[in-house]
Each structure stands twice: as C-alpha cells, then as structure tokens.
Image: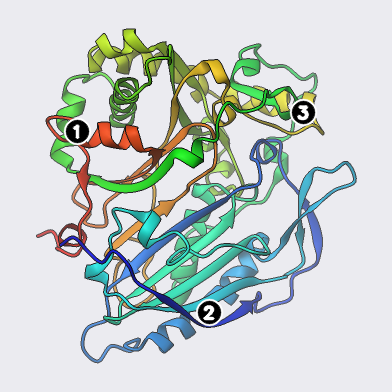
C-alpha cells in the first residue's frame, strides 16, 4: 500500500516525431495574454494498466508505435506544438512554426504501477515519469512499468498553451489513435485577443500584474522550501465543505479552506496571507470561437487578509471574501482590460504579481481549477487511464494547487499541490481530514 520509495529508469530510445504532412513555415505571434507567462514548463501524466487478454495493443511496443503514429497526425492540426519559441525583433517571444517536431522518449521503469508512490511526485514523478523538455514546445515520454502498465507524460511550454489548450490536444491525439473524427478543431486566431482602440483598463491591474523591471529582489526562493504532493478528496467531503457556505461554488469554498490553513501555517512575523485563483477567460469573452481557442486566456485575481483575522474567520466568511475579489476577474471587461494593460507595457515583460510576490506580502498560494481535465476521455485503445494528474512545480513565490476529477468518475477530486512543507503538514493535520493520502489502493480500485 505504501509503494516503492526508490526505483530506477532506463532510457530505451528517443526520436523526434514531426507532423506527418508538411507544415507551411511561418511565425505565429503570441497574444498579449501569452506574454504574461514567464518561460516555464507544465507537466501532465496518465497511467494505464496493462491491457488484459489478447488485446490488439497488448505489447508496450505496439502501444508506443500507435502513440507515435497518431502524434504525427495530431501535429498537423496542432502544429504549434511542433514548433519553437524564438525572439522577435523587439525581444518578445513568438512561435516559429517550422515542424521542428516533438521529442519522444521511451523509458523502462523498474517498478510496478501498484508500487508507485504518486502521493509524493518529488520521488516518483519528477525526473522519472515526466520528461524534462530540452528543446521545442512539447516533449513526450512513454514509460513501461515492470508490470506491463504504461505511463504517458507530456511537458509543454506554458507560454504557448494553457491547460485548456493541452486538454484539447490530448483528447484530439487520443481520438486520432482511435480513428475517430476530431470533436473540436483548435483556433489560433490572435485577432480574438487584440487590444482595443483607445486602450482602456481599470487601475486595479497595477495591483494584480507588474512589469518585471518593477519587481524587488525576492526575499527567498519559494521553490527551495516547497514540496510536491498529490492527494484526493472524497466527493462526500467536498459536499460537506460546501454545505457550510451553500451560496458559493465548490472551488470557491475549497480556496477558502486552503486560505485558512495557509494562515495557520504562517510564521510569527507574517502579517498578511495571500490567495489567488486562476480564471479562464474563454467563457467570459462573449465569442463562441473562444471555446476552441489555443493559447493562454488566463488571469490571476487575488486577495490579501491579515493572518490573525483569517485564523479567526469561519469558512463561510472566508468564502464570501474569496467571492468578493474573484468576481470582478470573471468578466469580459476584465479580460479586455488585461489585454489593453499588457499593450501599454509592451515590449517590457510583465507577470502576475502573486507569482513573484513581495517581501512584505506574506505567504500565498494560487488555486487553478483543473476540473475540466479529461482524464476519462484520453483513451488510445487499451482502456481508460487508471490515474492522471498535472505536475507543475512552477517556481513562483507562491504555492500552486490544482484540483482535478478523479479517474474513478465518482465525484472525487485528485489534488496536485506545490506548497511549502509546513503548509502540507498543516493540511495533513486538519480534523476532520479533507485531503487524504493518495495510495495505490485508491487509484487501482474500480468504483462500482
């Protein structure tokens, strides 16, 4: 049940997979919202049991062959993933769509699926199951486990795609492998996010975002003190939490819960505690074409509360505060204004202020809802994934938390966390427990 502490991996081969059809070479500008992302990579992985019986794809070699062939086809439609990020004439990043291709690594891991300690990605995932991208926009790793199971993982450049875009790609890749028509074609229309004339934005953007040149030196490196963990939350516990703040959504109440625990773990010298929520603007922008838009359409509104006040507040009270600062960041005007704000500051890069933080702002974290993660839909022909999660030790000065649907499909959440160890310890000490340790007994037991 506890899993294997240590296992070794052996790289069996690597190649670069290119689009199966020629791609017209061109430069694709990044949108103003893409330009808010610093250079950082996002990982995602899916675990598949060994196919039972005389399955058509019963061998690891046949599964890898199908993955490569379908990837080559998927890159025709999702050609930005086969390109490279380069600098334009003023030093801003842009996408060179040149069919450079995707590095595909094949690995053997001396461990069984039931032995993996996925609860601790620092030991089991980082540098082992999720690849480190060296070149290009996307890289892929297929890992064969000792039991014949397969772990499929991708790492992609966040400046090019957000999780919504990556989810579209994963579903399309699996649909091609299953010889199904694509359920959605991506849109790369940057005109959907062009600045307005005249430019207009609310002064609050200067609090939420900041030009890089205006940032003070960091007080400390958050990532030096952070650990990565994966938990699950039972559907009953999610509902129980929400019942105390019935007017608010599950994600708002979960954010409030995390904020309170963050305050409990704050150091004596910390006066303030910050919490942010990643908002996807696609559904806010009033254009149906945004539902298939490939790129970044994100904002991170956040709030700040006095640590002592936060410790005394009830969960329902904190949920109302979260709703209060989150709501203005969920409007069309917010995202149009953010596009305009970036335009004013170009070509100087800017970032979300909570990502970088400031010495006097205290501890902070960001919640990014991954509840649209298509863990049950990414099926290549050998069964549904037994488990899946994003993996994003993002390197910012705040923590990062992503709740996702469990592969069980029973309403449970899988929660990836990149937090300081003392915050993790505080979460694990909460009574009654909300975040439960992820064990093989959990993710390998089917829900009836």
Alpha carbon separation for disc pair 2 and 3: 40 Å
Quarter where residue 306 is shown: top left
Q: Residue at image x 51%, y 65%? A: 131
Task: Report which residue position mark 1 lands on.
Answer: 429
Residue 310 at what x, y percent from top left? 32, 12
Point out which mark residue 338 bears.
none
Residue 65 at what x, y percent from top left? 48, 85
Residue placed farthest to the left in the image? 448
Crowding at mark 2 (Cα within 10 Å: few <14, some 14-19, many 20+): many
- In the image, residue 214 sits, relative to residue 132, either above or below, namely above
Point out which mark residue 343 bears.
3
Pick the residue in front: 132 or 281: 132
Mark with earlier residue (2, 1): 2
Q: Quadrant of the N terminus?
A: bottom left
Mark with earlier residue (1, 3): 3
Q: Residue at image x 38%, y 20%? A: 267
Alpha carbon separation for disc pair 1 and 3: 46 Å
Task: Report which residue position mark 2 lands on.
Answer: 68
Pick the residue in front: 139 or 385: 139
């Amino acid at each position: 049940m506890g899993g294997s502490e240590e296992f070794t991996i052996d790289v069996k081969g690597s190649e670069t997979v290119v689009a199966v059809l020629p791609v017209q070479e061109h430069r694709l500008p990044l949108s103003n919202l893409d330009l808010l992302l610093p250079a950082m990579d996002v990982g995602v992985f899916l675990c598949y049991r060994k196919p039972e019986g005389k399955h058509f794809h019963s061998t690891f070699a046949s599964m890898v062959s199908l993955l490569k062939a379908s990837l080559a086809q998927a890159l025709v439609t999702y050609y930005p993933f086969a390109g490279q990020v380069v600098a334009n004439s003023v030093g801003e990043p842009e996408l060179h769509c040149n069919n450079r291709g995707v590095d595909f690594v094949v690995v053997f891991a001396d461990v069984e699926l039931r032995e993996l300690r996925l609860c601790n990605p620092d030991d089991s995932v980082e540098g082992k199951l999720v690849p480190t991208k060296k070149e290009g926009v996307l890289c892929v790793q297929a890992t064969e486990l000792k039991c014949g199971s397969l772990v499929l993982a991708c790492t992609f450049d966040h400046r090019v795609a957000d999780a919504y875009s990556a989810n579209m790609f994963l579903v399309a890749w699996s649909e091609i492998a299953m010889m199904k028509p694509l359920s959605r074609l991506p849109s790369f229309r940057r005109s959907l996010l062009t600045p307005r004339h005249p430019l207009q934005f609310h002064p609050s953007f200067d609090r939420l975002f900041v030009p890089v040149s205006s940032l003070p030196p960091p007080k400390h490196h958050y990532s030096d003190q952070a650990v990565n963990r994966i938990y699950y939350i039972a559907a009953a516990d999610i509902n129980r939490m929400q019942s105390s703040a019935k007017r608010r959504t599950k994600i708002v109440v979960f954010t409030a819960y995390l904020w309170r625990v963050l305050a409990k773990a704050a150091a004596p010298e910390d006066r303030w505690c910050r919490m942010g929520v990643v908002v996807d603007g696609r559904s806010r922008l009033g254009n149906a074409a945004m539902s298939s838009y490939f790129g970044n359409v994100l904002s991170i509104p956040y709030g700040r509360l006095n640590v002592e006040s936060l410790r005394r507040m009830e969960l329902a009270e904190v949920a109302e505060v979260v709703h209060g600062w989150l709501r203005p960041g969920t409007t069309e005007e917010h995202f149009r204004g953010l596009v305009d704000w970036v335009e004013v500051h170009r070509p100087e890069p800017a970032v979300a202020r909570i990502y970088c933080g400031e010495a006097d702002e205290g501890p902070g974290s960001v919640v990014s809802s991954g509840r649209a993660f298509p863990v049950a839909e990414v099926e290549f022909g050998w069964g549904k994934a037994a488990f899946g999660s994003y993996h994003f030790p993002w390197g910012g000065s705040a923590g990062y938390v992503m709740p996702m649907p469990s592969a069980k499909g029973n309403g449970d959440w899988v929660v990836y966390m990149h937090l300081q160890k003392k915050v993790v310890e505080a979460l694990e000490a909460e009574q009654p427990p909300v975040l439960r340790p992820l064990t093989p007994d959990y993710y390998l037991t089917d829900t009836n």
